[in-house]
Image (tube, grey):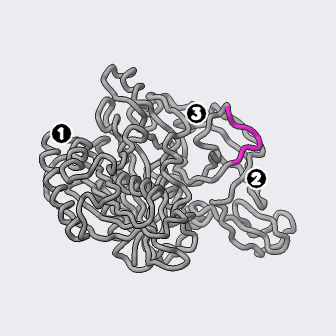
Amino acid sequence: MRGIAGYGVYVPHWRLDRKSLATALGAPSGSGTRSVAGYDEDTTSLGVEAARAALRAAPRLAPEMLYFATALPAYLDKTNATAIHAALDLAPSAPAFDMAGAVRSGAGALRAALDARGVALAVLADIRTGLPGGADERDGGDGAAAFLCGDDSRDSPVLAEPVASASATAEFLERWRLPGEPASRQWEERFGEHVYVPLGESAVTEALKRAGVTAPSINHWVVTGPHARAARRLAGVVGATKGTVVDDLGAVIGNTGTAHAGLLLAHVLARAAPEQLIAVVSLADGCDVTVWRTTGGLAGRGSSVDAATRLEGGGQVSYANFLTWRGFLRREPPRRPDPQPPEAPPAARAEAWKFAFTGSRCQACGVRHLPPQRVCVKCHAVDRMAPERLADVPATIATFTVDRLAYSLSPPVVAAVIDFEGGGRFQCELTDVDPGAVRIGDRVAMTFRRLLTAGSVHNYFWKARPIP
C-alpha cells in the first residue's frame, strides 16, 4: 500500500481584514480575513516551512525525490525546488523538480509523488494577489502544504491511501496571466461556471466508478478551485450533502490557489477517523479528483502542525502595508545605501550554512559554533568540528534592539541575540513580531525567509520568530 505517510501545512502569521478594503476603496469587500505572506516570504519560503512540518511529522522518512508546485515561482529559468531541497538538507542524490505556472500543478505534483518509487515529497505553495479592489485580492490567500508519500511500513504507516483518481481536461481561457504581469485576469464568471461544472461532474463520476463507491459513501468532500462559484455548484451537482462538504476556509484565510486543495486535505486528515473516504476535487484548467481512504495510522496523527493551529493568524496587517509588500504601493525607503545582491560563488560554498542552517560543534571541547568554524573559539582546536544542523533547535532571546533606520519593507527591524538549547549564540533578525511586545527570555524558533531581493537575486537565509 502506498499513500500519504506524513503531511504539514504552513499559513503565514499575518491577516488582512477585508473590511479594510472597503474602508480604503469604498467598494464591497465581504467579511472575514485573508492570510498574507510577510514582506520576507515568497512561495519558496512558504514551501520550506510546510515541508519542515511534514518531515517533523514523519521523522523516519528521508525524501528521495522532491516536487514543488506553485503558480507564482520566485524565479523563472531557475529551479526553485533546489532552494527547498537545500533548506531541508536533503541528500544530493535526491532530484528536485519544479511544476510551476498554474494552479493545476498542485494536483500534478501530488500525483507524481504518489507514482514515484521510494519516498517522495510534494510541496504546494502559492501567494494569491490581484489588482487593488479585485476579487483575487479580496478572496485570495497565501499558504503552503506538503505531503510525504511512501509505502506502508511499521515505522512509518500510511495515513491515507488513494483508492481511485480521475481527471477531465479541456482547453479554454478562463484565467490567465502573461509573464511579467502583476496579476491574473479572469473571464466572466458565468463562462467559468459553464465550462467547469460539466468537466467536474464527469471527473467525479469516473472517480467514484473506479473506486466502486457512490456519492453518499464519501465522508468528506473537498471541492475547491479559484472559481468559487463553480466549486459550490459542483458540490451540489455531484450529490455531496451539506454536512460532508468541507469548509473551504475562505472566510478565514482565503483561497490559496495551488496549495488550497492540499491544505484542505491536510485539514481533513487532522480530524478524520480511520477507514473514512475523502474525495478531493480540484477545479483548475479542468478537474482532478482523488478518492482517499484513511487508515489506522491516523490514530497517531500524521502532522505536528495542523491547519487549524494557524488559521486565526497572529497579527493584522494594514492595507497600506499589504500593498507595499505586494509591490503595488511604492514608498520612500530609508535614506541608507541600497541593499547589495548576494554573490553566487560564496553562496554556493556556504550552502550548508546559508540554506540548511548547519553550524559546527567542536569534538574536543563540545562548544557549538554559528556560523561553522574551522578553529574552536574556546579550546582553539583546528579541524575538529562536526556539522550540526540547528534549524529545528529552539532558542531564547538574550538581548535585542529595535532599529528604525535599517532598510526594510516593514520597519522597524528587530535584531536579536539568541541562545540555542544545547549551546550556541547567534545574532539574527526577528520576524512576525510586534516590536513593542518583544522581551528578553522569549522563546523563538528559526524560520526560512527571503531577506531581500537586489539585482534580481533573492537572498534567502534564516530568521527567528516567536514560538506560539
The mark nearer the N terminus, 1 or 2, is: 1
Name the residue located 47 percent from the left edge and 43 percent from the top edge.
37
Seen in the image, is 212 located left or right of residue 436?
A: left
Q: Residues within 10 Å of mark 3 (few under 14, many from 20)?
A: some
Q: Is residue 348 above or below residue 245?
A: below
Identify the residue position indicated by label 2 in the image. Answer: 419
Residues shaded magenta: 437-443
**Label 3: which residue?**
411
Circle 1 — which element?
Answer: helix
Q: Nearer the viewer, mark 1 or mark 2?
A: 1
Q: Amino acid at mark 2?
A: Asp
Could you tell me residue 314's position as x and y percent?
56, 38
Mark 1, residue position: 189
Query: Disc 2 or 3, which lies upstream in sequence?
Result: 3
Q: CA distance from mark 3 to mark 1?
A: 40 Å
Q: Is residue 206 left or right of residue 391?
A: left
Amino acid beneath label 1? Glu
**Residue 344 percent coordinates (x, y):** 51, 61
Q: Which one is earlier in the sequence, the residue at label 3 or at label 1?
A: 1
Residue 33 in view here: yes
